[in-house]
Amino acid sequence: MPTLKTVVSRSLGANAVRRFSAVATLLLAFAQSATWVRAEDSSALFREALRQDLKGGPADARLAFDIYRRAAEAGLPEAQFNVAIMLDSGRGVSRDVAQAATWYARAASHGIRRAAYNLGQLYEAGQGVPQNDDLARAWFKASDLPAARARLTAIRPSGAKAETLSAPVLVAPADGGLIGSGADNVELVWTARQGPEGVRFFVELRALVPSGSREIYSGFVEVSSLNVTFSNSLKGVFAWRVFAIARGSSRYAASNWSYLRTSAN
């Protein structure tokens, strides 16, 4: 089997605890907004969504979700967190825990610690994502909230060890998806099944250029999402993939390449 270094160097080929009160959640996100706001339009959208949501009615919640979603798609982390909370609880939108997990991961990639904690709970329980004790621990460590530290001491192996090492499944952006032409970052999200041994992940993001491809990012991470910053002058088609690397051995499993492009193309 070729080593990871050889493969990477090749060019591109042809529950109730997390569902705390809505008001507390929204106020937490609002308090963080001064730190995370990147664009005035996203900030204005978030404030309007918050205003609608605090009215408390079902129709208000539905409208709030739609506006939060717009701000979240524009990359506002606290809006991404609120979208995840609403999808997780089914407030203002049909409940979809798998989608909630993706939005938690996107928010957590920006350092939203409550999102990391909630995602750790989903991996521990196997709700919306594959049950994975290792990723649950990794997300609890990333959160570092008191409740997350408590879960680290309480979590017990499920015993659901797989016989083979599975490749990560790339979740977002969707294959062939668009990112804004002026974007200076992209949130990469994947999931992984519990392996026969502990793993970490190696992520590659490359820009496709006439001569082949150019590395934008490569590196190891412990969790299942990553926010990659790059020059907003970059335009065109990009490709990314994720390796699951077994700890203490040379075994690995790689996802397929997934492609995305700037909206100007």
Image (cartoon, rainbow, N blue to C red):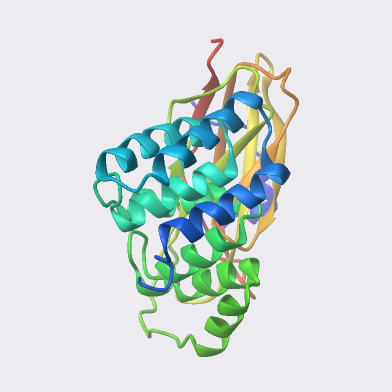
How many numbered markers are drawn? 0
User: Is residue 215 or residue 126 the one in the foreground?
Assistant: 126
Q: Quadrant of residue 185?
A: top right
Residue at position x 32%, y 58% in the image: 89
* Outermost residue toward the front in this view: 55
Q: Residue 252 at x, y = what percent?
A: 55, 61
Vertical order, 100 against 160 (above or below): above
Vertical order, 208 against 66 (above or below): above
- Note whether residue 18 is visible: yes
User: Is residue 7 or residue 127 the one in the foreground?
Assistant: 127
Vertical order, 168 against 186 (above or below): below
Residue at position x 34%, y 50% in the image: 87
Q: Residue 48 at x, y = what percent?
A: 49, 33
3 left or right of 134 in image:
right
> If the image is split into quadrants, where does the N terminus sit?
bottom right
248 left or right of 14 in image:
right
* Outermost residue toward the top in this view: 265
Q: Quadrant of residue 192?
A: bottom left
Q: Residue 36 at x, y = what percent?
A: 68, 43
Q: Quadrant of residue 128?
A: bottom left
- Note whether residue 9 is visible: no
> If the image is split into quadrants, where does the C terminus sit?
top right
120 left or right of 215 in image:
left
User: Is residue 35 or residue 163 the one in the foreground?
Assistant: 35
